[in-house]
Structure formats: structure tokens, C-alpha cells
Image (tube, rainbow, N blue to C red):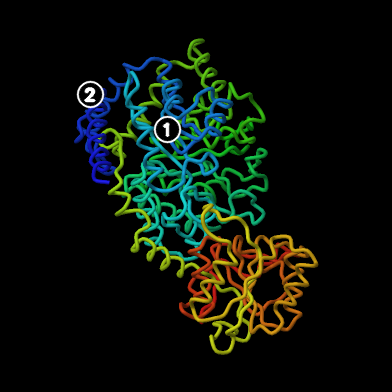
Amino acid sequence: MPHRTSRRTLLTATAAAAAAAATGITPAQAHDRGQDHGRDHDRDRDSQLKKLISRMSVEEKIGQLFVMRVYGHSATAPDQADIDANLSQMGVRTAAELIAKYHVGGIIYFTWAHNVRDPHQIAALSNGIQRAGLSQPTPVPLLIATDQEHGIVCRVGYPATLFPGAMALGAGGSRDDARTVGRIAGAELNAIGIRQNYSPDADVNINPANPVIGVRSFGAVPASVARMAAAEVQGYQSSSVASTAKHFPGHGDTSVDSHTGIPLITHTREEWERIDAPPFKAAIAAGIDSIMTAHIQFPALDPSNDPATLSHPILTGILRGELGYQGVIITDALDMQGVRDKYGDARVPVLALKAGVDQLLNPPDLPTAWNGVLAAVRSGELPESRLDESILRVLRLKARRGLFSRPYVSDREIDRTVGTRSHLAAADRIAERTTTLLLNKGALLPLSRRREKNLLVLGADPASPSGSTGPPTTVLGKEFDRLGFSATVLSTGTLPTQAQIDAAVAAAHGKDAVVVGTYNAGAGGAQSKLVAALVASGVPVVQIAIRNPYDIAALPTVGAALATYSWTDVELRAAARVIAGAVEPRGKLPVPVQRADDPAQVLYPVGYGLSY
């Protein structure tokens, strides 16, 4: 271990020297000094970065604009299946070969791409990627990114600290908690070499049927979402991780998933100003490093109906011109159908750059996309000076987040930062402040270890958002056991059959109470029938909505109902402690819950939440 740590330290110094030699940027110039660097410092830094850009070939410049997936746990020695995937999709074997061939400026980590096994492996992958970047003819460190929103979208799982997601934080209502989440999560990402996080989600979720945002949003009230988003931005960037507000100009009122189609936003310009814009304005005021586009049509902002990702009126006219944003604009993933419907994969990146984008994220076919941009430059459609503008913004971000002065990470920093006892305790405390109690008939809750000692814990068991925790019923059962109850666990899934419902009712016989987790339960659906059968059995039923808080509107009347806004361990354990009375319920709904049979009627308004 001492040898490995000292080697990493040496590599860090060597990489910093290589970057300094290439750019002329000294460590003092490259070091992150917060948002206010001083005019002289900025001019000096920009002068050096422009010199670096001037030494790049056109091919290197094009590569700097792409942020790409790559398969494998190692930059140079991935598993054979990952080599095969890289060859079939990009014509390279490894991350190092990807960087050498296409000069990409960034890499995005995914669980399904086998990038994220454990913190030390992730750090080794990050260091290997940086070595490859700094070995190019024009040495440039890479910006390594991921989607670590927390809640239902997390790429880096246990033993990293996992926090409640945005809507849970919205229920807690504490800007300090949102800032703490960003600060701690940012520190852990930084320690493993990830310097750009595609978080927070700044969408205002006013459509309960939204299939892609939902609990990823802080809520339905623009001013509240704005406050929470700005606080999380401050937290991430205080840990020198670039924060990314998404999805501009606003993805909160959609009923179509932009992964599979193109949503249409029917808001007027005035409604956009009132509903969608405030969180992005707040993020910009907080010094946000990057903003991600949405693959949505927004006729009130651009009547051409081009996706916002490809819209010059939206990105350059509004985001740059009207809102005054000078940071990096990154596309949402270019392999999503919402941006591919209207134009081919060779044209999409060209049109995105012409619209004002700086980073092109994860095209489905990198050779096609890369060569499409090259052809546009050679034909004069895209002036080389346009590439230079975006590269300068990206390099500024890399300098601001310390990549020229400290591109590598160390094992020692991982051990003293990732998943520490204090970080895990902070996650537990924050989660306890988010659990929302919606119904408590006859003061059923809190449950007593004497009166309701024997519990049946059952319900939906969706795969863990982080890929390394759960299942929900098991997590709840273990926490109830720890709290002094005796819990029997039964998984019934999201579509319980009649046989499973009958088995659940039989298992409830003789129990003192039932705790059932529901996951997007629809009126009259299988989960609703399960809950109805449990209520009819006469055993007190406590229902937990483990994703969207709207489930209670689709269920028969239970004894008590709570919302956790996600099914990660930290939120489920907090809900168990609330049910057991170990902590008070403090969460307040950040979205309204409407009647299932009459959405014009509100069952529980924004701000609703019971306490003991």
C-alpha cells in the first residue's frame, strides 16, 4: 500500500508537470479559487488556454467536444466482453485507445458499462484515463462525469454515501441539507476522480404523469425548486466538482419520456418564465459550471419545433443572451430518441454546436458523429473558431476544477473520504427530515414494540437505484428487527398475482400490523388489489410509497400512509424509524397529490405533512 500511494503521488506530480508544460498554466493558475478568480488571473489563464488550443489539430479540437461512454473497469485492461463491446460500437478496445483515436475531452461513467465496481477500482480507472489524456500529442486532462443525482438515479453505489434524492430533499425543505448533500457527495466523487456531476435536476415537476422526471425534481413550486437547486450547486462546487443543472429549458411538464420519443411542452412564454425558468436562473446566479439541454419541443420558445438541444433561439438566444449564462452547455445524451427523430446521427452534433452547445454527450455512434463534425468544419459550415469558443469554455471548467494541477487521485484520499462514518450519519439525519406522513387514522403510528411487535413487511421490490442495495422489503425488515420488532418479510412485486395476494393475506394472519411498500400503484391495479385485501383482513395496514408520493390516491383507505420518494436504503431505514417512533415525521409534500378519479381535486396540497 505505501508503494502504491507514493506511486500515485508521483504520477500526480508528473501529470501536473506535463499539463503545465503543455499549457503554460502553473499550478497556482490552474488551482480552483472559487468563482471569483480576479480579472488579471482570468486573462492570464485564458491566454494560456488559447495557446493550448492553437496547438491542437482540427481532429483534436473536435474530440475535445465529445463526452463518451466506454466499457470496462480499466482504462487499459478491461474484460474481454467489454473489449468486444468497445470494438463493435467505437472500433477501439479500451478507454486509452478511445482517447488516442478520437481525442475525446470527457468520459461518462455508467454502471451498465462496468465502470463502477468499487471506489478504488473507479479511482484506478480515472487515473488510467488521465494518463491516456496526458500522453496525447497535445496533453489535456479529461473531464470525467456521471449521473449521481442520488435517490432513484445513482451510478456509484455502496460503499459510497447514498443520499435522499431531490424530491425527498424538497420534502425536507432545508437548503442547508441540500448544500450538505452536494458538499459530501461532491467530495466523494472528487476522491475517485469524477469532476463533473450531472446534478441537480432543476425541472419543476408539475405533471404527476411525468414518466422521466418525477421524484428526480425537488418539487412543483418554482421558487422552492430554485432555492434547493442553487444550494446543491453550491455544495457540489465547494468540493470542486462541476455541477450541472438539467434539463434546460425545463422538462417538468411532460408525459413522454425523451429516451423513447420527443415530448412537447405547451407552456406559453409567460408560463415558462413563471414555472420553468426560476431554477435555472438561480443555478446561474449560484455560479453553475454547466447546464444540460432537454430533448423537448417548446414551440413558445422556438416555433421551428427543433429539439431544444438543437435550438439556436433557446440555447444562444435565451440561455446565453437573455439569461447571461457564460458557462458550459452540454447536451443530454445524444443516443436518446428524442433528439434522433428529426435528423440523422451525423447531423445532430453539428446542429447542436451551431445552436450553442459546448459538450456533445454520448452519441450512439461516435465515428459517425465525430466524422459529421469534421465534414462540417472542412466544408466551412462550422468555422474552426466556433470550435475554439466551446473548447475554451470546457478548458476553463477543467482548470477551475483543478484538473491541470491535480489530475490524479490517491488511495489515501479515498479511504479518508468515501463512505465515512460521519458522511453516512449525515445521510441518515437528512433522510429522517424528509419522510412524509400523509395519513394516520386513530393515531396508529407510531407502532409500539409491545402492542405491534410482530410485523409483516411486504410489497414491491424494484431493483436498487444504486445497483448495490436493497431489496426494499429486506431493508425495512432488518431495520424493524434492529428497532426491537419481529418482522416477517414477503416480496410481492409490482404486479402481484392473485396467488401472491392470497399468500400475503394468509401471512398477515396473526400479525399485529402490516407494512406494505407500493411502487407507482395505479387505481384498480394489482398493487391496489393487494392493499385492499390486506385492509379487508382486519390487520392494521401501514403503506409506504417508495417512489412517487401519488400512490395513496389510488389505494383503499389504509391505517397510515407515508412517502419516502425513493427506495434506497437510507430513505427506507428512515421511514422505519418514523413508523417505530424513533424519530418524528417532519417531511412536507413538495408536490400536490390529486384524486385518482378527479385530478382537478387535491387530496393533499403542497406543504401537507402530519407529525406525532
Above or below, 137 relative to 3: above
**Percent from the top left, x then y, of residue 20?**
23, 27
Of label 1 and label 2, which has the lower sequence position?
2
**Percent from the top left, x then y, of residue 96?**
42, 27
Amino acid carrying mark 1 in the image: Ala
Q: Residues within 10 Å of mark 2 (few under 14, many from 20)?
A: few
- Residue sitting at 49 percent across and 11 percent down? 380
Q: Position of 163 compared to 209: left or right? A: left
Kindly check if marks 1 and 2 are in contact, taking CB atoms under 8 A apart as contact. Answer: no
Amino acid carrying mark 2 in the image: Ala
Which quarter of the picture shows residue 501? bottom right
Residue matched to label 2: 21
For the residue pair 185 and 204, the one nearer the viewer reads as 185
**Percent from the top left, x then y, of residue 266?**
65, 44
Residue matched to label 1: 75
Viewer-nearest of discs 1 and 2:
1
Gap in angstroms between the C-alphas marked 1 and 2: 24 Å
